[in-house]
Amino acid sequence: MVSAAKTVDEYLRELPDGRREAIQAIRDVILGNLPAGYKEGMMYGMIGYFLPVDVLPVKSGPPVAYISLASQKNNLALYLGCQSSERIDRFREAYRATGKKVDMGKGCFRFKRLDDLPLDLVAEFVASCPLEQFVLEYKPGC
């Protein structure tokens, strides 16, 4: 489900109980480990953590996403944004190593319940890429 919410608080308020708590728990992990400089806001109908446009200007559209979080029709999802394929591969392999089932698309990890997502791995991944490093590794068109 794509949200028309304009703020993160509005997005959270429109989620059903259970999903709201799960998204808030993941959001807390992200915010607690997010390197300095990234911003939080709504992007593509979901919560996004992105580069400010003064750090990495874009010609049109929203800023460049580092990571995003969504409640969709059939699942919850964590999008790894404009990450390198190597970083996504490392995350996928570390996810598998936890013994939890990996359900992923291209840079998108889907899960049904909060317990299906290894939050310690999310924390480690989020903290692993300072803003300056992300800018250096960014490839337009991701």
Image (cartoon, helix red, strand yellow):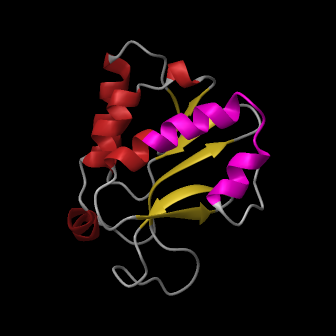
Observer-nearest of 115 and 99: 115
Q: Is residue 63 above or below residue 102?
A: below
Image point 44% across, 16% down: which residue? 100
Observer-nearest of 141 and 136: 136
Q: Is residue 121 visible?
A: yes
Quarter of the image containing the C terminus?
bottom left
Magenta-span inclusion, residue 58: no
Snapshot quadrant of residue 129: bottom left
Image point 28% across, 36% down: which residue? 90
Q: Is residue 108 visible?
A: no
Tell whether 79 sits left or right of 54: right
Kindly give the residue lying farthest to the top in the view shown.
99
Q: Position of residue 71 (x, y in %)?
A: 67, 41
Q: Position of residue 1 (x, y in %)?
A: 77, 46
Observer-nearest of 39 and 107: 39
Observer-nearest of 41 and 43: 41
- Magenta-drawn segment: 8-28
Image point 32% across, 54% down: which residue? 84
Q: Main secondary structure of the magenta part?
A: helix
Q: Position of residue 2 (x, y in %)?
A: 75, 53
